[in-house]
């Protein structure tokens, strides 16, 4: 049976100091849910400091909190770290996820794993959750291995939510691949080459958190499946940079659009996630228009007074 009430339901969030995790924590608490947040390098305030790569710490934490639900949003996604430290990446994205899935099963907790559109090769968009996966880079491969660990647990009543590139109320602009574009926009002293190739669907963590809340609230419905959620607006990085410039009335003629893929980790050309099954099951999901979302997210990070 379902939860009669979520009030006595305990939710544990990993990566609660991260961009998505902070928003999950905030929204779940606002709903009156009994919520514990885990962090590691950025543990502060009410967050518990737990190293997800340390089995003993994780086990002790689960025994102490006995969560009904675990939302696993902790991951290594920084491209430079993923490229230069594949072992450390696999340790967090894959091994820690396998361990968490096993401990959640022992504990009878429902596990919701946050994954990525990078599990696809970007040649056959839009993607349904059932579409064949074919990750092109190490990040996508590690997250797909994490998905398998979560869903292959014996009699898995777990769920996966795949999301695209995220942005929101960043602590520093380099916390998101979207907001970091502000740096190129602000530095008019030199021409900046900005990719005008891969199609991206920047999605606000506030919208993602609402979807996570719906999946948690009705986790009997969510269990055993992979779900997709994405904003619908399609922009290249160059397109995003231009929107950022226009929103704040900043010059952007120093930005040069770069056609075609660049060296470095291969990225999917168009990995648009089809969200319609998620909406059919859990109701229509609002997405904040990019212009509005990015203005809110970046206003605190502008060195100048922002025009009203």
Image (cartoon, grey):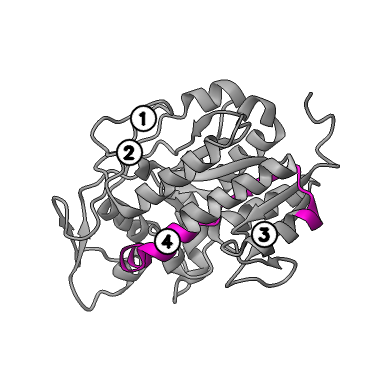
Residues at marks 1 and 4, CA–CA distance in whole angstroms: 25 Å
Q: Residue at x 46, y 42 (%)?
A: 163
Circle 1 residues within 10 Å: few <14, some 14–19, many ≥20: many
Left or right, 23 with reference to 262:
right
Q: Secondary structure at mark 1?
A: loop
Q: Secondary structure at mark 2?
A: loop
> Foreground: 7 or 191?
7
**Which residue is denoted by mark 1 in the rendering?**
127
Upstream in sequence: badge 1 or badge 3: 3
Q: Nearer the viewer, mark 2 or mark 1?
A: 2
> Foreground: 17 or 87?
87
Residues at marks 3 and 4, CA–CA distance in whole angstroms: 18 Å
**Pointer 3 with pointer 4, Cβ within 8 A:** no
Assess whether residue 174 is covered by the magenta stretch.
Answer: no
Locate residue 6, reporting x and y percent.
80, 38
Residues at marks 3 and 2, CA–CA distance in whole angstroms: 30 Å
Circle 2 residues within 10 Å: few <14, some 14–19, many ≥20: many
Q: Secondary structure at mark 3?
A: helix
Q: Nearer the viewer, mark 1 or mark 4?
A: 4
**Which residue is denoted by mark 2 in the rendering?**
120
Q: Is residue 196 visible?
A: yes
The circle drawn on residue 58 is 3
Upstream in sequence: badge 2 or badge 1: 2
Region of the chain picked out in magenta, as a range: 63-91
């Amino acid at each position: 049976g379902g939860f009669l009430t979520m009030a006595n339901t305990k939710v544990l969030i990993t990566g609660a100091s991260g961009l998505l995790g902070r928003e999950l924590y905030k929204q779940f608490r606002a709903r009156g849910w009994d919520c514990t947040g885990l962090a590691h390098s950025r543990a502060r305030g009410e967050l518990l400091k737990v190293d997800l790569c340390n089995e003993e710490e994780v086990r002790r934490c689960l025994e102490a909190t006995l969560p009904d639900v675990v939302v696993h949003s902790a991951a290594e996604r920084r491209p430079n770290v993923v490229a230069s430290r594949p072992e450390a990446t696999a340790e967090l994205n894959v091994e820690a996820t396998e361990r968490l899935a096993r401990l959640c099963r022992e504990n009878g907790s429902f596990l919701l794993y946050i994954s990525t559109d990078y599990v696809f090769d970007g040649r056959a968009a839009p993607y349904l959750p059932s579409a064949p996966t074919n990750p092109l880079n190490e990040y996508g491969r590690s997250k797909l291995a994490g998905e398998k660990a979560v869903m292959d647990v014996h009699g898995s009543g777990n769920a996966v939510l795949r999301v695209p590139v995220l942005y929101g109320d960043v602590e520093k602009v380099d916390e998101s691949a979207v907001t970091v574009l502000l740096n190129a926009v602000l530095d008019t002293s030199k021409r900046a080459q900005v990719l005008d190739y891969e199609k991206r669907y920047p999605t606000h963590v506030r919208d993602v958190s609402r979807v996570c809340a719906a999946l948690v609230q009705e986790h009997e419905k969510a269990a055993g499946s992979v779900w997709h959620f994405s904003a619908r607006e399609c922009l290249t990085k160059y397109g995003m940079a231009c929107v950022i410039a226009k929103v704040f009335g900043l010059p952007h003629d120093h930005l040069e659009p770069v056609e075609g893929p660049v060296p470095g980790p291969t990225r999917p050309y168009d990995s648009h996630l089809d969200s319609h099954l998620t909406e059919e099951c859990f109701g229509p999901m609002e997405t904040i228009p990019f212009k509005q979302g990015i203005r809110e997210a970046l206003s605190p990070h502008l060195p100048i007074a922002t025009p009203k």
